[in-house]
Structures are given as structure tokens and as C-alpha cells.
């Protein structure tokens, strides 16, 4: 007998009879949910990254202090990647008798590749998008140059040997945020005019840039190719290595989206587990008949496994194309939320959906399917005979393995996946214990009641296996839904609230120590509150535990850059409010003279700096050595002043330092800032409004994306509700027929069914509220690093919502049983 051919024949027969439809629908919805979420999150994450890449004005930036080799540009052209070239250097410009240090930037015609420049044609004019770069002989400048140089639109300025006419004011420059603390104001000119200034001599401090943009896969390949060339002094940056604020926002948004996708997978697993149990129960007769016809146990098992896999493959194919269509519709609905075009879908979510469908079926159905080979042939005559019960250990091992593989794979964050799996396993254990306790309590309680209450409680206590399965299924389903609801409402609100409207949008740097009090007083007189003025010391890390630091010691490109750059370090007696000590302890006032450092966690992990490490910095020609006393996480997207390394006051207070502060500057108080700059010309004011806009944009898009993913998860939750109710369908058919034969009224049975399912739903909702709260607390503190608050209203909503939804759905599903004559049911049995 050809097992595959026979399995397909049985599959076709059972499909016509409706035996496999519930399981197939569960798989289709599972795969469609996963695929649509996969497509959606993949495209939205890439769109968010592309929108954030405006900070570099490209997807990739190659930087060097020497002219870039021509073959880098030729390779980009060969790969058909968009490209632009820029260069930047400090210089002095002349206007009448005034001079001013500026940062001159020359740009090619294709600049920028990502984002748009915004300019004004006059001081009081409205902002607008610049479709071109400055024409030959023209220069655009920052607004802060106007009071410093006394220049106006239309005036001539001189840069080296070349004169330029000031034509526009720069409002927003995409890649300026990638180099936030640029001391001198910007002057933008055409790249072709730079040579005529005569300023590009051998001793010029010029930085050369090659900007590249294209598909993510091409960008990754090009980056690896550039790094393989081993060109000295070359740095390659993408958005995640450019700004910690944006990297933090992107990583956080990605975690939210992946968690939302994981909830859809979890619900689909519950749905398939409930559906497969009913499928196995209804296939016991087919197995017994095959055994009577001479099929061996191995043949029967092989036939059912092949039928299961065939069903899974067909349903998964339907699911992936359904998911593709759904996400296409969704992208059309929300595409206008993004400033740039959303990238085209890749093929990976299709493959991911197929693998997910097969894994879900194998993990949650295969142990039950194997049971079918053990059905005794005598069942054909004695219907009460069945296969030996499945080993819970085998079932849990298979389910846990599939669950772990899928969650770790889909989430991409081992810690988040581990906490989610641990929470669900703990929840499963609690639900099983409570369901057993419920049956134990209801058994004597039903004798103390009458009417509908008695029949409803008796139904729950009389079928402990079904009650346990339904309560567990409802509880896990509600837990996942409530978890996503908490993420969607509470954690997302906390994330967005971390960057309120009055977050600092201005930085003042290069404040001299003798100017600190005067600057503080001037800002206070103008009604501007700062977050404090902090000392900032430039230092280079020269040794770790006595070993010299070299970029050659690291393979990670970010580690190589950090090993060769100067750090902004500081000293303090108290950690800042957006810093959290994750390892070690902060020093007390009595320990301020110790030689200790506090290091940001990301820097420590990148450079391999554990607690207790001895660090040595070179500061202004002298060496400063201290031990790492604590590691701390930093909320870079808060836009407060923060440092990678902080020392004790006794260790660094004698080192030369300037001061830095940040504050929120309303538009109507800009004159206060102008007055401060005129009084203290050495101070540099940096406007980070554009960078904040990028971070807020990522937060808003991430929140909207999670809102949309919630709709998919809700659809998966509905199938869990339906399959959970259908799990007791066979028993309900027989019980209803017997009770109606004995004369129980239809209205009493209807009310008893409502009470039965409402009790299950309310209890499942209450338990799931506790489980979802515990899991969300763990994720908020350990993964998202966000504040968490207990939501009491969610508990009440879960209790009432579970009782109402499950009660009404179960009653509606049972109405057909009450309308069927008992004699018809008895004859079928």
C-alpha cells in the first residue's frame, strides 16, 4: 500500500466530510496571522530604519580624513547603489571686518540620499523643502551665524579665495544630527566650488564622506566589501552606530513589534492544540477500521502523520498567501504615516510562515496523532475502547520544544523569549492546578444548588479533562491578549512619555568654569530651567587592566571606533535620574575621593569591561587611572546630558573641563539664547530639535504599528475562543440529548450552558490578568527598561470580559444542540 497516496485519499475524503476543517482553519489563521505580522513588521521595521537613516542622509556613510579611493565609488556604481559625496572642514569666513569660525561643508548634486533639507529664504520666512543644493557661487548658512557675523540674506562672504552670496538659511540638515557636537556653525556650499577656495592643502583638517543608499541586503554586502579592503583610517557607519538616541529608539521599537508578532504565534499555538485534540478523537474510528483491514500500527501511524503534514503544507500555503494579501491592504491603509516609501516585501516571511505552520502542527499535534496507531481494532464493536492516554511528559516536551524554537526565532531576543516562555509555563502550571481544584470544589457544590446552576456546575465537574483543557486554553489565550493589550496601552505610553513635549531641545557646550554661574543666572532670568550644568572632560581610553587599547584587538566595527576615539567623561556625586545602576553600586558622599569609574552598560559590553576592571585615560597629557565600581544603563533617547564614563569628583575634579547643559527652549524665547551667545561668544548652542523629531517619529510609528498588529492578534484570539468552545462539543451533544429525554426544559439547559461558560470565562480572565501583569512587569523591567504600574481596571475588565464573551459565545454555539431532537442524537450515537 502506498502510504502517501492513501493518506492523500483519506485527506480528500475527510475534507469533504468536514472532519479536518476546524484544524485546517486553525492552521490557516495561524499561518496567515504569523505571515501577515511577519510581512508587516519586516516592512515597518525597515521603513522605520529608513526614516531614521535621514540622520546620516544615507543608509551607509564611509568616512576618512584622507581623500576616499576612487574604487569605492566605482564599486557603488557597479552595484547600482545611489551615492553622493561630501566633505567638511573648519575654516574662517570673512564679512566686511568680521570673521567667524565655521564648519564648511561641500556637497554634490545628489545630496541628500535620505531625507530632505529644509531652508528659509529670509529670517522671518516660512520653512520649505530644498529640492536642490546651493548653486555655484551661493552659500547657505545656519541661523546662529547671523548675529555672530552680522550677515544678511544677499550679502557676500569670503571663504578663502572664493566669494559666495548668502542665499538661504539652513533650518534642517539631515546628517547634522549624526555629528551633534560640532562646535562651529555650518556653511553649505557646492562641492565643485571648494577647490577654488584654495583651502584644501596637505595640512587641512578635511573629513571626506561617501554616502550610499540602496536595498538592505545590498547595503550589508557593500559594507562587508568595504571593510574587507582594510583601508587605514576608514570608518563605516550606519544608523545604529551613528547616534545612541536613535539606536535606542530603533531597538525599542523593534522589540515592541517582535513581541506583538510573538503574541499572534502563541494564540495560534493554543488554537491548533485545541483543534488537534478534537481531530484525534474523531479519527479513532478510522484508525480502528484500518487495523481491522490488516494495517499494522506502524502503517496507521505513518498514514496519519503523512495526512497531517499534507494538511499542514496545504493550509500553510493558503495561510501565507492570505497573510500577503492582508498585509498589502494594511500597508495601503497606513502608508501615509511614513515620510518615505515603505520598502517592498521580501520572501522571508513566506518561508517563515510555512515553517511556522509545520512546527506548530508537529509540536502540538504529532504526539496526539501518534496515539492513533495504538487504537485497538475491537473499537469497531466496542466504542468505549480508545488508545492509551497520551503521555503528558511527551506532549509537554514536544510543545515546549516547538514553542521555544518559534519564540526565540521570531523574537530575536533571547532574554525576552526566555521570560515569555517562563511566564507562560508558570501560567500553564497555575491554570492546570486551578482547573483541578475547580473540579474538586464543584463536585460537592453542585448538590447544594438546583435548576440551571446544578446542571451547569455538574457539567464542569463531571468532565474534568474537558474542563481542564478549556480553562487552560481560555486562560492562555486571554493571557496573551492581555499581555499585548498592556504592551499596547501601558508600556507604549511609558515609552512615548519618556520623551515629553518639553524634553530638552537645546544643548550649550564649551561653557567655561568661570561662566557657569552667569549662564545659570541668565537662563533663570529668561524663565528657562536646565537639568543642571555638568563638567565635561575629554579623555582617551589607553589601557584596560594595564593592557594597551588598540582597535586591532576588536572585530566589532563599533568597538574599533570606540577604541580610537576621545570620550566625553564627567564627575558627579549622584547618578542622573535617567541612569539606572545594573551592576555594582554608586559611591557615597564619603567615598567621593576614591579612584572609581561608572561605565555605561553598552560601552562596557562592546569593549569587554566587566565590574572591577582598572581603566586608564589620557586627559590633557596626563594619565588618570581608576577601578570600574558600577555599570549603568542610560536612557539615551531622553535627550538629557549623559556620559559614557563618569568618575568620582576626587579622581577628576583637578582635570581641565568645560561645562555642558541641556534645556527646553520654546520658540518665543529664542531671543534669550541669542543674548546669551552674544554675551558669551565662546559658548556653542546646539539645536537638537531635528534629532528629537526623528526619535519621536520612530516612537509614533512603532506605536501605530503595534496598534495594527493588535488587530491580527485579536483575530487569532477569536479562533482560540471558538476552538475552546468546540472542545466540549461531542460531550455536549450526548449530555443535552440525555437531559432533554429525561424532561429537562430547554430554557433551563440554555441558562445552565450560559452559567457554565461564563464561570469558565470569568475565572480564566481573572487568572490571565494576574499572569499578564506578572509577565509584563518582568519584560518592562528587564527588557524594555520602562516604568510599570499595576492596572486594576484591566483585572476587572478581564474578569467581566471573559465571563461575558465566553458565556455568550458558548451559549450561541450550543443553541443548535437544543434545537436538535434527542431521538436524532441517540440514533447517531
Image (tube, helix red, strand yellow):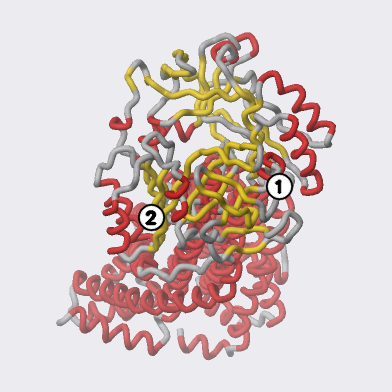
Quadrant of the drawing holding the C terminus: bottom left
> What residue is at 45 percent from the left and 49 percent from the top?
196
Q: Which residue is mark 1?
A: 500
Q: Identify the residue at horizontal 36%, vertical 85% (top origin).
A: 14
Q: Residues within 10 Å of mark 1 (few under 14, many from 20)?
A: few
Give the Cα distance between marks 2 and 1.
34 Å
480 and 23: which is toward the camera: 480
Q: Residue at x 67, y 19 (%)?
A: 513
Q: Which quarter of the image is occupied by the N terminus?
A: bottom left
Asked which quadrant contains residue 684, the reply is top right
Compared across the picture, whether 258 is left or right of 608 comes to: right
Rendered residue at 74%/45% (across/down): 502
As displayed, is residue 206 above or below residue 621?
below
Which residue matches tag 2?
409
Between marks 2 and 1 in the image, the one whose residue lies nearer the viewer: 1
Q: Position of residue 712 (x, y in %)?
A: 54, 69
User: 240 or 33, which is in the foreground?
Assistant: 240
Which structural element holds mark 1? loop
Mark 2 crowd level (few <14, some 14–19, many ≥20, 10 Å Cα): some
Q: Is residue 146 above or below residue 308?
A: above
The spot of residue 465 in percent (x, y) is 49, 62
Q: Secondary structure at mark 2?
A: helix
Compared across the picture, whether 801 is left or right of 481 comes to right
Image position of 239 (left or right of 526) = left
Camera-nearest residue between 431 and 721: 721
Q: Please indicate, yes or no, whether residue 666 appears anywhere in the rendered image.
A: yes
Name above or below for residue 458 compared with residue 825.
above
Instruction: Residue 219: give x, y in percent of width and height.
Output: 36, 57
Residue 529, picture quadrant: top right
| Quarter location, residue 722 | bottom right
Amino acid at each position: 500500500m502506498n502510504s502517501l497516496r492513501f493518506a492523500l485519499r483519506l485527506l480528500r475524503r475527510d475534507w469533504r466530510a468536514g472532519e479536518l476543517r476546524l484544524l485546517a482553519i486553525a492552521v490557516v489563521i495561524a499561518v496567515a496571522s504569523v505571515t501577515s505580522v511577519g510581512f508587516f513588521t519586516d516592512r515597518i521595521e525597515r521603513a522605520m530604519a529608513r526614516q531614521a537613516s535621514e540622520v546620516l542622509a544615507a543608509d551607509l556613510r564611509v568616512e576618512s580624513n584622507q581623500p576616499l579611493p576612487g574604487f569605492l565609488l566605482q564599486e557603488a556604481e557597479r552595484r547600482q547603489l545611489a551615492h553622493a559625496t561630501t566633505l567638511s572642514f573648519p575654516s574662517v569666513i570673512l564679512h566686511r571686518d568680521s570673521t567667524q569660525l565655521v564648519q564648511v561643508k561641500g556637497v554634490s548634486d545628489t545630496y541628500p540620499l535620505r531625507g530632505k533639507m529644509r531652508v528659509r529664504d529670509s529670517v522671518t520666512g516660512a520653512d520649505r523643502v530644498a529640492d536642490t543644493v546651493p548653486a555655484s557661487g551661493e552659500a547657505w548658512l545656519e541661523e546662529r551665524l547671523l548675529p555672530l557675523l552680522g550677515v544678511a540674506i544677499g550679502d557676500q562672504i569670503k571663504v578663502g579665495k572664493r566669494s559666495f552670496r548668502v542665499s538661504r538659511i539652513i533650518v534642517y540638515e539631515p546628517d547634522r544630527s549624526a555629528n551633534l557636537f560640532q562646535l562651529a556653525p555650518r556653511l553649505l556650499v557646492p562641492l565643485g566650488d571648494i577647490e577654488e577656495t584654495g583651502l584644501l592643502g596637505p595640512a587641512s583638517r578635511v573629513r571626506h564622506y561617501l554616502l550610499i543608499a540602496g536595498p538592505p541586503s545590498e547595503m550589508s554586502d557593500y559594507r562587508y566589501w568595504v571593510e574587507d579592503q582594510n583601508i587605514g583610517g576608514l570608518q563605516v557607519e550606519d544608523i545604529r552606530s551613528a547616534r545612541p538616541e536613535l539606536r535606542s529608539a530603533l531597538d525599542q521599537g523593534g522589540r515592541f513589534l517582535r513581541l506583538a508578532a510573538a503574541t499572534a504565534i502563541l494564540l495560534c499555538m493554543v488554537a491548533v492544540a485545541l483543534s488537534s485534540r478534537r481531530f484525534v478523537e474523531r479519527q479513532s474510528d478510522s484508525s480502528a477500521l484500518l487495523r481491522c483491514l490488516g494495517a499494522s500500527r506502524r502503517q496507521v501511524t505513518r498514514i496519519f502523520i503523512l495526512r497531517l503534514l499534507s494538511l499542514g503544507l496545504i493550509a500553510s500555503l493558503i495561510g501565507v498567501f492570505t497573510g500577503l494579501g492582508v498585509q498589502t491592504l494594511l500597508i495601503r491603509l497606513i502608508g501615509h504615516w511614513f515620510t518615505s516609501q515603505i520598502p517592498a516585501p521580501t520572501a522571508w516571511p513566506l518561508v517563515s510562515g510555512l515553517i511556522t505552520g509545520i512546527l506548530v502542527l508537529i509540536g502540538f499535534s504529532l504526539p496526539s496523532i501518534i496515539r492513533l496507531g495504538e487504537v485497538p481494532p475491537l473499537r469497531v464493536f466496542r466504542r468505549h475502547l480508545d488508545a492509551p492516554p497520551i503521555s503528558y511528559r511527551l506532549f509537554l516536551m514536544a510543545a515546549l520544544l516547538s514553542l521555544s524554537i518559534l519564540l526565540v526565532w521570531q523574537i530575536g531576543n533571547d532574554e525576552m523569549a526566555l521570560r515569555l516562555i517562563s511566564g507562560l509555563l508558570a501560567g500553564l502550571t497555575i491554570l492546570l492546578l486551578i482547573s483541578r481544584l475547580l473540579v474538586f470544589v464543584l463536585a460537592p457544590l453542585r448538590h447544594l444548588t438546583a435548576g440551571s446552576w446544578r446542571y451547569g456546575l455538574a457539567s464542569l465537574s463531571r468532565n474534568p479533562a474537558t474542563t481542564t483543557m478549556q480553562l487552560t486554553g481560555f486562560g492562555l489565550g486571554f493571557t496573551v491578549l492581555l499581555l499585548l493589550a498592556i504592551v499596547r496601552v501601558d508600556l507604549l505610553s511609558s515609552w512615548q512619555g519618556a520623551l515629553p513635549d518639553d524634553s530638552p531641545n537645546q544643548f550649550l557646550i564649551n561653557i567655561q568654569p568661570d561662566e557657569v554661574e552667569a549662564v545659570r543666572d541668565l537662563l533663570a532670568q529668561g524663565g528657562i530651567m536646565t537639568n543642571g550644568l555638568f563638567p565635561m572632560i575629554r579623555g582617551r581610553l589607553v589601557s584596560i587592566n594595564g593592557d594597551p587599547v588598540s582597535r586591532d584587538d576588536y572585530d566589532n566595527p563599533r568597538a574599533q571606533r570606540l577604541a580610537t576615539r576621545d570620550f566625553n567623561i564627567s564627575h558627579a556625586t549622584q547618578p542622573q535620574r535617567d541612569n539606572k545602576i545594573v551592576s555594582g553600586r554608586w559611591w557615597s558622599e564619603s567615598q567621593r575621593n576614591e579612584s572609581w569609574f561608572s561605565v555605561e552598560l553598552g560601552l562596557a559590553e562592546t569593549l569587554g569591561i566587566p565590574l572591577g576592571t582598572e581603566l586608564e585615560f589620557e586627559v590633557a597629557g596626563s594619565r588618570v587611572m581608576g577601578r570600574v565600581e558600577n555599570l549603568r544603563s542610560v536612557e539615551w533617547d531622553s535627550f538629557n546630558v549623559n556620559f559614557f564614563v563618569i568618575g568620582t569628583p576626587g579622581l577628576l575634579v583637578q582635570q581641565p573641563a568645560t561645562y555642558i547643559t541641556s534645556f527646553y527652549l520654546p520658540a518665543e524665547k529664542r531671543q534669550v539664547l541669542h543674548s546669551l551667545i552674544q554675551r558669551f561668544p565662546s559658548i556653542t548652542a546646539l539645536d537638537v530639535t531635528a534629532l528629537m523629531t526623528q526619535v519621536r517619529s520612530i516612537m509614533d510609528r512603532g506605536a501605530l504599528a503595534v496598534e495594527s498588529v493588535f488587530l491580527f492578534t485579536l483575530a487569532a484570539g477569536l479562533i482560540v475562543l471558538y476552538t475552546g468552545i468546540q472542545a466540549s462539543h461531542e460531550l455536549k451533544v450526548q449530555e443535552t440529548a440525555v437531559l432533554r429525554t429525561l424532561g429537562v426544559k430547554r430554557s433551563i439547559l440554555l441558562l445552565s450552558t450560559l452559567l457554565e461558560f461564563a464561570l469558565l470565562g470569568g475565572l480564566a480572565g481573572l487568572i490571565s490578568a494576574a499572569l499578564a501583569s506578572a509577565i509584563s512587569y518582568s519584560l518592562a523591567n528587564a527588557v524594555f527598561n520602562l516604568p510599570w504600574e499595576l492596572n486594576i481596571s484591566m483585572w476587572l475588565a478581564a474578569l467581566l470580559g471573559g465571563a461575558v464573551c465566553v458565556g455568550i459565545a458558548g451559549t450561541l454555539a450550543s443553541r443548535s444542540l437544543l434545537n436538535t431532537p434527542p431521538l436524532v442524537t441517540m440514533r447517531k450515537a
